[in-house]
Image: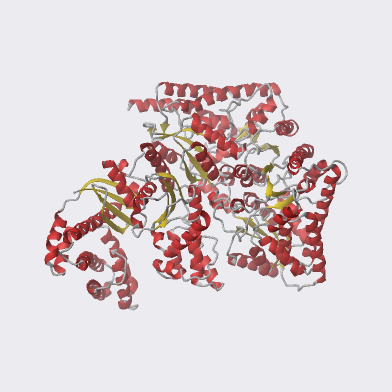
Amino acid sequence: MSKSREDGAKKDQSMVIQKEMIANHYKRLERVPETREPVVYTFVPGNLTELVRSFGALPVLPEINALQSGMRKKSGDYIAEAERHGHSEDVCTYVKCDIGMIKAGNIGPTGTRLPKPDLLLLSYTGCYTFMKWFELLREEYDCPTVFFHVPYQGDGILEPEHREYMVRQLHEEVIPALEKATGNSYDEDRLKEYLALSARSEDDLVAVLQSAKQRPSPIDAYFGAVYYVGPIFSAFRGTQEGVNYYKALRQEVEARAAAGLGPVAPSGPMGEEKYRLVVEGPPNWTHFREFWQMFADEGACVVASTYTKVGGTYDFGFRHDPADPLGTQADYCGGCYTNINLPGRIDMLVDYLKAYEADGFVINSVKSCNSFSAGQLMMLREVEKRTGIPGAFIESDLVDPRYFSAANIKNRLESYLQMIDARRAGLSA
Amino acid sequence: MRSVIGIDLGSTTTKAVILDEAGEILGRGITNSRSDYDLAAAVARSEAHTNARFGLLAQAAEGRVKPSQIARLMRAFRLEQTLRQLVRLRELVEEEVEKSGFGGLKPAAASAVAEIFKRIEEEERAFFRNLDPPKRSDFFRDAAGSAYTRIAEELGDPQGVSFDMLLGLYDKCIIRVENEPLDLGFRDHILAALKRIGSPEGLRGAVSMAAETELEEVSTVGTGYGRARLPFPKEQIRSEILCHGLGAHRMFPGTRTVLDIGGQDTKAIQVDDRGLVTSFQMNDRCAAGCGRYLGYIADEMNIGLHELGPMAQKSKRCVKINSTCTVFAGAELRERLSLGEKREDILAGLHRAIILRAMSLLARSGGVFDEFTFTGGVANNHAAVSALEKLVHENYGEKTLNVSPDSIYTGALGAALFGHSLEN
Amino acid sequence: MSRASIAQWAKELYEDLDFSVVRRWRENNPGRKAIGYLPVYAPREILHACGCLPVGIHGGGDRLEIIKGDAFYQSYICHLPRSVIELGQSGRLDMLSGVLFPSTCDVIRNLSGMWKLLYPEHYVRYIDVPQVADPRIATDFWAGELRRLLSDLGELSGHVPGEEELRASLALYNDLRQAIRELYAARSEAPWTVPSEELYLLLRAGELIPPEEFLAKIREYLAAARAEPGRMRDNSRVIVVGSFCEQPPLGLIKTIERAGCYIVDDDFILGNRFLVEDVPLEGDPIEGLAAAFIQSAVKSSVVYEPDPEGKRTLLKAQVEAARADGVIFAAASFCDPALLDRPMLKDGAEKAGIPCIAFKFSENSGQFQQFREQAGTFSDSIKLWGGV
């Protein structure tokens, strides 16, 4: 008993820091009508947080608001609200959740009102829906929008001319738009300073994620890691707060690893690590804890995931580089997971299965997100073919509670894990 | 005798299979699923025991009596079970009449009820006496329900005790009868059944041997849709996908691919030469193309589920149906009918559409390999089987297609086999 | 040829899921390649200049039974990619040497990666059209992409076209677009002389044959249509929007018209009308083609709309240009571009007093009853209460 309390306390330390950071950020956003701090809305993949911050602006990330609404069980009502306004049942529920939230008064996840944007910075990275999302938001806010086009890595690499195209857009479109919206001029020294802070956080994050190579893994690299990537995927990359958080987190995780402890699931420390899994696809947010617990109850620990790379892929060596402040942002955007082509995503899964000595992989296919989902059945087959390891396929949604069937998911997951058992035991009838 | 039992708690039926120490099948039992999962499992288990004891009995009596006598004993036993349940149902219905707010209609209701039960009982006895009885459902709820409804319709008086009032009584009470533990086991009724057929000399010894044999259950494994509700420890609960794989392997040892189309879901499973699952795919949360879809169609056409297949097989020209969405099933059907399409052609199209859905799951799971075993309720539908045969042939070439008359027990059999391996 | 016989010819091409006409072209043109492209926009001029036959891949409609394609896609993804996969997996696209995947949406984008794995022998290219507002940056990027395509296809076909050849292809496609505009104008002028079904079939046939032949066919059809007056009916005039990628089944187009709505403008097979103005023939041809996209691409759901007024006023402008009475949103189920645009477009239309209805289809929809009822009611209400 004392052990679990201790685990809880350890888990809490970084969680406390994170909670405080986020609460402060939203409070700061709430005070914007008085402080007049400029506000820039942008998306998680390809977010140019350092650049935005270097203009003294505060970032707001609509996906984060939507997923938080999902976790707080508010998304169902917001989605219904958006559908009442003519949105189709078929389309992305992040968008509908966000639109519904705006229609319902724009109260953010921590209960504070969100300020209107001074600029919609549409970093078009790996998701078609982003384009429509900001066209729709522009209708709500009637504010300037700047489009930053990140070419897709259709051939599996970031072409040099695509990198130049992005750098040119930053110079000639994005920076002028930020200058106009914030009233501040571009300060490259400050940007470099922030980028250096980013690289430090990124080093620590990678160490945390790669700790899962150990047995037992001290972290759950999917359910647990979505908390770990929270700050760096949202408003805190390139900030001192971010650096502090990742330092504390890394120390915590390293201590767990040294003590041979496994991760802490929603209902307490996980028992024996029976299965090491790799997961592809975003989690479901409306039943996040229940979903995680299904894995934890079976002793299934996720040791690597692709979702934790949507806001930046760092574990293959990329770091923000202050020496090339705009080029490095182009590299960052180009390498976000959803901007990588399907063969590249398959390579990554195969690599994870080997590097993390996983027993299997699970694809959580979400209805909302075609960027992730279209082609996942083929990924399943290809990864099976290349590794000889069978995978599991489960289906849910991001924030639409109507698309979470606990019985169906549990059935598939249990069947899959029992199949791994049977294979291990070589059981014969 | 030591035995292991596997129980498959499905969405519509609950099945049990008992194996002996050598892993050979001793008996099978089935009942309709109901709100009390424990009880459904207990009834299926008791039925499997009954079936096992009849098996022992037949073995012991072999050569001493004609097989027809054993069959007659079995039917007498069923009659005893039915009468027992009828008595209880009647008690409950009478209580309901007493408690009801029928006011002045109470005496009339009581006499209608008495008449209904009298007639059902007569019909049941006649059914037993009939040497070649028509096929019907083995479940009390179905047999009693259809008789009750028919007689109530005849006796119902729109001005007095109406059909709806009578049916309301039944609906309320049948659920209670089903969810009460009743003494319906072999030992409870076999002597009465034996007496009913005149206690033939050659059967007496076999009956007492069968009744006295102890079937010690050393292991129980549960599976199926409702398995999480079974009061078993975790290691005694197995996914129905694994159980279907193992069960199909046992029925047809050459099996490499299994397709199971049940009421709520469709599963495509690949197994290795030991029956272990290597890959599987299930339908998503939408039940399009599952057995339930055929149920909607049957309701829409106002015919029995078992009539769909034979009607579809009369088709000469299959209509192309692109949607197997349960929600639109009715609309699609009505539009086709309004366009003048023949019922059998539409039905043939619907069967094909269901099988097309299954084909995509099969492809997702890796394809169809020899031998290919088809299980689940829809495997009893010949139109579905022939559509499957055709499509498999067109897309994967010549494959052996296995369909067992006992395919409904595949999951329970697999569960029992897991139990058996746990013990050995 | 009469109108009906041209329509019949087009229908045979449309219904032929083996693409025999493309196969015959390859046999008659040994050594030359056929290159497929998915919706919406592909720069066919470059394919043509390299001596390749551009082949539009629009799925299998309601004529193709999906057996293998469903194994690749979940139920919540539109129908088009599964029928494209079905065509590929059943060997029906084996006469192609490559396929272009335009940046229409994430489903088609991801299909480009799947295609690379499924058909390593094909040239596979994802065509990322420019989305930025600044025309100089956009043109430079797009010209770079086009040059890359030209160089790849030059290598693939063994024929690197010179400037004059490129210019000739640009001119040919300018003529073709002009002819299609005339076709639509004739339809808008007197819809009873150019039935929607025939217009649509003609456009579909044009996706499979050399542009020279297509141009000749359009001219022939126009002449025939002028010669056959047809009978005017008391129909309302509508525009259909949302069908620019996955194509509606022919039955749906017929149903709308038979229910009393003349479709006087639409976005079916939008790619062949994507450039609204002629590509300039002076100067560098690639620069010209790139600039034409930047300056005169039709407003659609697949390209970012930098003007905040753009979405609000789009349908009003289209309805006025087509002298239509109302708008039918006909989007494919699960089509992100069409369905995400719909609320914005609909708001704009309704604010302008334009009557709208909306429904979803799938390329293999088999029931038209609900469409018939909706379109019929819509037409009646327009006639009763007036359109715009």
Quadrant of image for the N terminus of chain A: top left
Which residue sits furthest right?
C282
Residue at image coords 43%, 59%: B291
Residue B64 appearing in the image: yes
Count of labels in the image: 0
Q: Nearer the viewer, residue B417 or B304?
A: B417
- Vertical comparison of A134 with C350: above or below: above
Q: Is residue A245 visible?
A: no
Q: Position of residue C236 (x, y in %)?
A: 71, 67
**Rendering colour mode:** secondary structure
Residue positioned 79% across, 61% down in the render: C218
In which quadrant of the rendered image does the C terminus of chain A lie? top left
Name the spot of residue B9 as percent of width and height, x first.
33, 52
Residue A136, compared with residue A167, is above or below; it is: below
Quarter of the rendering containing residue C212: bottom right
Q: Residue C363 is drawn in which quadrant? A: bottom right
Q: Is residue B77 left or right of residue C18?
A: left
Left or right of C266 in this view: A104: left
Where residue B322 appears, x then y in whole percent?
A: 55, 61
**Picture coordinates of residue C250 (x, y %)?**
65, 63
As rendered, which of C388 and C29 lies closer to the eye?
C29
